[in-house]
Each structure stands twice: as structure tokens, then as C-alpha cells.
Image: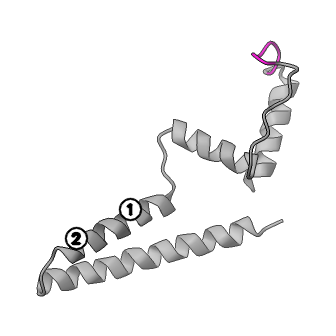
Amino acid sequence: MRWDKLAEQQIKKAEMEGQFDRLKGAGKPLKAESGNSADAAGFRIMHEAGVVPREIELRKAVEALRAKLRDTPEGADRTAIIKELADVQLRLDIEQEARRKYMNLD
């Protein structure tokens, strides 16, 4: 299920349960934000829970392996790092493609 639909369901449920009653700023308009607010809410929830998306973890791993590769002289160690970098880069590419396909769903 897409973030926007999931967020809408949760908002309606909370509203029906009265969870929005007596909130600070009740009845006042929300500040407009650029971008998709449902995605922003999802990222905020993940941040508060200390969760990092796999795509971000893989990007960090690719950068770390590239740095390690720059500092490693020719030899067996370098070959192993190149293989690991190729594997992590492939997994990152798969994650990015999955996100692109997911975001294009209507």
C-alpha cells in the first residue's frame, strides 16, 4: 500500500477515535510543505524510530567501500573489495529500481 493511502487511513481512524480533539493548534491551518507530505510523514516516523531505509544503508556501504578501495594497493585484498563493491552496488541498484517502480504506481 502506498504511503499516502496508508496515511489517509490512519488519519481517518484517529479522527473517528477523537485523537485530534484538543491538540495544540487545533482548528488552525497547517503550514504548506513542499513535496509529498505522506512521504515526509513516513520518513519522519522512520527517523523517530531510528530506522534507516535499506537504500540509504547501501549508499553508505558503497561510499565506504570506494574509500577503502582508494586506500588499498593492488593485490588479493583489492580484488575482494572490488567484488564486494560490485555486489553492494548491484543491491543498491535493485533497491533504487524498486523504489522508482513503487513511486510510479497510482
Extreme residue in the top direction = 22
In the image, 15 versus 72, the foreground residue is 72
Verify whether residue 21 appears in magenta: yes
On the image, the x and y values in percent for residue 48 come to 53, 36
Element at badge 2? helix
Element at badge 1? helix
On the image, the x and y values in percent for residue 12 come to 86, 34
Main SS, magenta region, reads: loop
**Residue drawn at (60%, 39%) of the image:** 45
Residue 75, quarter of the rendered image: bottom left
Provide the residue designation for mark 1.
Answer: 60
Residue type marked 2: Lys
In the image, 61 versus 32, the foreground residue is 32
In the image, 34 versus 14, the foreground residue is 34
Residue type marked 1: Lys
Verify whether residue 91 appears in magenta: no
Q: On the picture, is 52 further left or further right than 86?
A: right
**Residue drawn at (69%, 50%) of the image:** 39
**Residue drawn at (33%, 77%) of the image:** 85
Spatial CA distance of label 1 from label 2 is 12 Å
The label on residue 68 is 2
Q: On the picture, is 50 further left or further right than 73?
A: right
Q: Is residue 98 above or below residue 13?
A: below
Residues in magenta?
Answer: 20-25
On the image, the x and y values in percent for residue 25 come to 79, 18
